[in-house]
Image (tube, helix red, strand yellow):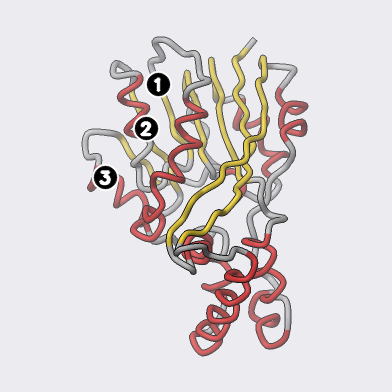
Amino acid sequence: MPSWDPQHYLAYADERGRPFIDLLARVGATAPRRVVDLGCGPGNMTRLLAERWPAAEVIGVDSSSDMIERARTDQPDLSWVQADVREWREPADVLISNAMLQWVPDHLDLLPAIAALATEWLAFQVPANFGEPSHTIPIELAASGEYAEHTASVELPGSHAALDYLDVLRADFEVDAWTTTYLHVLRGADAVFDWVSGTGMRPILQALPAELRERFVTEVKARLRVAYPASDGVVVMPFQRVFVVGRRR
């Protein structure tokens, strides 16, 4: 996984947080004793779990030391653990993961092991917009010319269709799976670049040497401005996400 900049990630905290709220609204747990947020990031949304279930032990888990440090600073009353989701084996009554599984290679194969940790409820959402210009433009450019030798081995995020997740989980859970497209209204001609450079584009940017990175950024910005034209300084970015909520049978 790439290294993370919590401040950059939080620049669009409201837009990134809305799917978490929509996901949480479909979880019917009433009095869980233990709630785990896998891939908690800077912890700003994990706070909502503590507010929803104040009597529960709430634990945020993330592989990024920078994210966990930020979470501990901003939310010192909650529990934070730096750990790789692929190695996390602690059970929880409610297990939630918000925009994290797409970073785990072959996460569909890993899903049964993760789901086994959820004793009552499992809920997660992943981006499903990897075929949109916001992602295809930097990926195609990174695979061309002088950039290619530096980015050929970069692991990029990816997700599956809602039906794929449902099929994996349906034997053990009553599953509610759906897809939603958000229309994010962003300000600034380079707002789409700012968004993806804080998430999906980070592995590419980190793989490029400084002298190429600046040139790459300039070209990506120019292409994204064409794909997402600004009107009066406002850009609309459609963003599709897959949601899955399961209640153990």
Lateral position of residue 146 relative to residue 85, left or right: right
Residue sitting at 33 percent across and 58 percent down? Answer: 7
- Judged left or right of residue 26, residue 53 is left
Which labelled disc corresponds to residue 16? none
- Sequence order check: which comes first, mark 2 or mark 1? 1
Q: Position of residue 88 (x, y in %)?
A: 51, 37
> 144 above or below 169?
below
Which residue is painted at 32% across and 26% down in the image? 50
Q: Which residue is mark 1?
A: 34
As shown in the figure, which amino acid type bears the numbered disc 3? Answer: Arg
Query: What residue does disc 2 label?
Result: 59
Name the one closer to the observer, 100 or 177.
177
Quadrant of the frame with the C terminus: top right
In the image, what residue occupies the spot 29% across and 16% down? Answer: 55
Residue bearing mark 3: 72
Q: CA distance from mark 2 to mark 3?
A: 11 Å
Q: Amino acid at mark 1?
A: Arg
**Which callout, 2 or 3, points at the residue further toward the start of the chain?**
2
Secondary structure beneath label 1: strand
- Where's the N terminus, which quadrant? bottom right
